């Protein structure tokens, strides 16, 4: 049943992209940091997961940590994961936590430029930073097998068979993690701190004049956002069971940006709509689906998909840069009090 | 070290520097005149490259009219891009960041349209059928006739652009628009004309660079995008507004990459693949430390023209 497989993959990617979208929304939509290097933090999560599985799981399986790149080592990890549910689940959880920590650290580090440059220049700088990371990893065989990438990152539910059920369970897990991230971000932004984010976005000098510290807020936001992106990267690594530098190109950042703009600036519920639309464009226009429908094109369909994505992005910033759904006031205690008063007056 | 070993990086630097300069002056020109940091400039380069390949490989044209055709196609594409997207956004006073994102979107569209064309033609990796002949040997390197063309073309284009901007009416209008749009419009400068001229010239230079690149080495639809960060580095070194600074920046990127990786490999055994990181670091360092790039460089004993001393105040 390929159609159910396609649907399960769609749900998984929606969940992963939704985590990325709310993390970018936190930085770009709420705080006004144009983090065009988002893919770097996503990659950081995926690579941290590869390191943890490559070294820990291989050792647990009785292999040596020296040749994690070989196909034999990958096969060893996979058969071990299929037999030992506890070990692979443990490694998965550890990798998830480690990714979140590495993401937070890297985010804190790369928030430092945002204290000096702003706007277009900051976006450009973060984009370049992400490319440095990609080229560096690609050219260094010592880090996760360099340009070859590393396979054999087993699905944490490898012991569940048949494969269809396994992927379904994993998709549900991704949705669960995405809901958790959503809940966490909503909890964090519907506070006075969340209003400071928007103040920094709208007028940094005014925020300073009111005794807020924009630098501190930016560092905190980048740490939280990058940590979420790294969690998404970790989920992706365990889903695709392979990490390679070609998965982490700047295009992905702009795909996520189009989701955020489509859903509305600083609107995490609206982002669900953006994620559904863009992921549908991304997943349902694969060559395999077209050949299943009996449509034969003289070129690779992927290119048409990119054209559509670019079109959506360009039209959105031209006509609705604030997004389709409006930004809503944050439900902070102060806002609740104001609303109650407004109601009693009416 | 044998001095002849320095010849290959020198020849490569001159070639890369000239091509990057040709691309970067266009990027600087449109930014200076219309305040659009056009990421899709990369795709204008690719478009020029593929136009040359189409004319030379498919239609059997001679290389010189093919280069002119490439320039024309890219110039028209640049103008259309501006009329359809950027001019409308500027008229609606869109934020710089949104214009940047729009240009990224336009770039994605154009790049993958070229991908579709290249895939249909079977040209995902193609070289123009133009033979390059070595003219003389310099150390361990061959100096080709292509380099002897590219170097003067880059320099003459830069000089022509300088004369155009400083000695012609339309060039003066463009500089006026770049300095102060409202004042220029109030003084009767034909703002729209200046704008269109800037985009046409910028596109033509990008097409020229792309066409020369297709003669120099095999191209693919991502060639412009891959080179873009070098071009941005050169423009940022020129403060995004100074043509002279951009030319210096283009050659600085060319020499920095080739000699940087040469010495890094010689002294620290750094593999060649790291060479693009040199360019990336240039961008980051310039943005963080000196956002105005090479413009307004002063020696320590020179006076800062922008600082007002106590006596003047």
Image: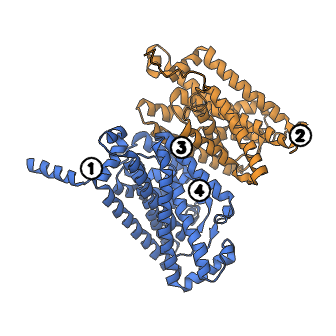
In the rendered view, does A326 fall on the left or right side of B136? Answer: left
Which color was chain B given?
orange
Q: Pointer 3 indicates a residue of which chain?
A: A
In the rendered view, does A220 fall on the left or right side of A139? Answer: left
Residue A67's place in the image compared with A219, above or below, is below
The span from disc 2 to disc 3 (Cα, nearest Å) is: 39 Å
The residue pinned by badge 3 equals A124
Foreground pick, A168 / B233: B233
The residue pinned by badge 1 equals A329
- Residue A302 visible in the current orientation: yes
* Image quadrant in which you'd find residue A67: bottom right
The residue pinned by badge 4 equals A301
Q: Residues within 10 Å of mark 1 (few under 14, many from 20)?
A: few
The span from disc 1 to disc 4 (Cα, nearest Å) is: 41 Å
Label whose residue precedes the other's in the sequence (3 or 4): 3
| Callout in the foreground (3, 4) | 3
Q: Are marks 1 and 4 in contact (CB under 8 Å)?
A: no
In the rendered view, does B86 fall on the left or right side of A151? Answer: left
Same chain assignment for discs 1 and 4? yes
The span from disc 3 to disc 4 (Cα, nearest Å) is: 29 Å
Label whose residue precedes the other's in the sequence (1 or 4): 4
Foreground pick, A91 / A147: A91
Locate residue B303, reporting x and y percent: 56, 21
* Image quadrant in which you'd find residue A19: bottom left
Q: Pointer 1 indicates a residue of which chain?
A: A
Which color was chain A given?
blue
The residue pinned by badge 2 equals B139
């Amino acid at each position: 049943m390929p159609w159910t497989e396609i649907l399960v993959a769609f749900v998984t990617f929606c969940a992963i992209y939704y985590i990325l979208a709310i993390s970018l929304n936190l930085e770009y939509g709420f705080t006004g940091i144009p983090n065009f290097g988002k893919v770097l933090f996503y990659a950081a999560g995926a690579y941290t997961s590869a390191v943890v599985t490559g070294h820990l799981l291989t050792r647990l399986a009785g292999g040596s940590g020296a040749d994690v790149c070989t196909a034999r080592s990958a096969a060893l990890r996979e058969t071990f994961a299929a037999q030992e549910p506890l070990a692979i689940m443990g490694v998965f959880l550890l990798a998830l936590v480690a990714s979140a920590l590495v993401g937070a650290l890297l985010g804190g580090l790369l928030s430092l430029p945002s204290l000096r440059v702003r706007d277009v220049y900051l976006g450009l700088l973060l984009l370049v930073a992400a490319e440095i990371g990609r080229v560096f990893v690609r050219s260094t065989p010592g880090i996760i097998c360099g340009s070859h990438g590393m396979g054999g990152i087993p699905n944490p539910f490898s012991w569940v068979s048949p494969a269809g059920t396994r992927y379904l369970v994993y998709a549900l897990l991704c949705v669960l993690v995405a809901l958790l991230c959503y809940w966490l971000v909503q909890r964090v932004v519907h506070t006075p701190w969340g209003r400071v984010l928007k103040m920094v976005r709208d007028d940094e000098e005014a925020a300073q004049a009111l005794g807020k510290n924009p630098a501190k807020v930016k560092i905190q936001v980048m740490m939280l956002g990058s940590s979420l992106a790294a969690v998404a990267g970790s989920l992706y690594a365990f889903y695709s069971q392979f990490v390679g530098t070609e998965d982490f190109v700047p295009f992905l950042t702009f795909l996520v940006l189009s989701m955020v703009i489509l859903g509305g600036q600083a609107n995490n519920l609206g982002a669900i709509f953006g994620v559904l639309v863009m992921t549908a464009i991304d997943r349902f226009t694969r060559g395999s689906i077209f050949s299943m429908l009996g449509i034969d094109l003289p070129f690779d369909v992927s290119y048409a998909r990119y054209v559509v994505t670019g079109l959506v992005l360009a039209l959105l910033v031209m006509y609705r840069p604030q997004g389709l759904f409006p930004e809503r006031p944050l439900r902070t205690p102060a806002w609740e009090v104001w609303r109650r008063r407004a109601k009693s007056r009416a | 070290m044998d001095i002849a070993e320095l010849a290959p990086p020198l020849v490569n630097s001159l070639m890369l520097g000239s091509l990057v300069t040709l691309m970067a002056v266009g990027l600087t020109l449109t930014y200076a005149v219309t305040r659009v940091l056009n990421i899709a400039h990369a795709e204008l380069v690719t478009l020029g490259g593929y136009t040359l390949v189409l004319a030379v490989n498919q239609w059997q044209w001679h290389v010189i009219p093919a280069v002119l055709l490439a320039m024309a196609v890219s110039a028209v594409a640049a103008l259309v891009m501006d009329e359809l997207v950027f001019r409308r956004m500027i008229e609606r006073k869109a934020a710089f960041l949104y214009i940047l994102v729009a240009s990224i979107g336009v770039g994605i569209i154009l790049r993958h349209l070229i991908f579709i064309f290249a895939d249909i033609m079977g040209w995902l990796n193609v070289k123009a059928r133009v033979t390059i002949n070595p003219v003389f040997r310099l150390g361990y390197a061959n100096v080709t006739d292509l380099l002897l063309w590219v170097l003067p073309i880059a320099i003459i284009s830069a000089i022509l652009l300088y004369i155009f901007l400083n000695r012609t009416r339309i060039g003066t209008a463009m500089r006026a628009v770049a300095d102060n749009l409202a004042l220029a419009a109030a003084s009767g400068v034909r703002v729209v004309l200046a704008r269109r001229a800037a985009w046409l010239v910028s596109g033509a230079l990008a097409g020229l660079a792309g066409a020369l690149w297709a003669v120099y080495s095999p191209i693919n639809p991502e060639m412009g995008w891959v080179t873009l960060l070098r071009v941005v580095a050169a423009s940022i070194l020129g403060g995004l507004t100074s043509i002279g600074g951009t030319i210096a920046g283009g050659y600085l990127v060319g020499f920095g990459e080739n000699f940087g990786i040469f010495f890094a490999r010689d002294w620290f055994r750094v593999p060649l693949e790291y060479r693009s990181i040199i360019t990336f670091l240039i961008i980051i360092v310039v943005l963080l430390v000196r956002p105005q790039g090479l413009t307004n460089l002063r020696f320590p004993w020179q006076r800062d023209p922008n600082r007002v001393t106590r006596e003047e105040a």
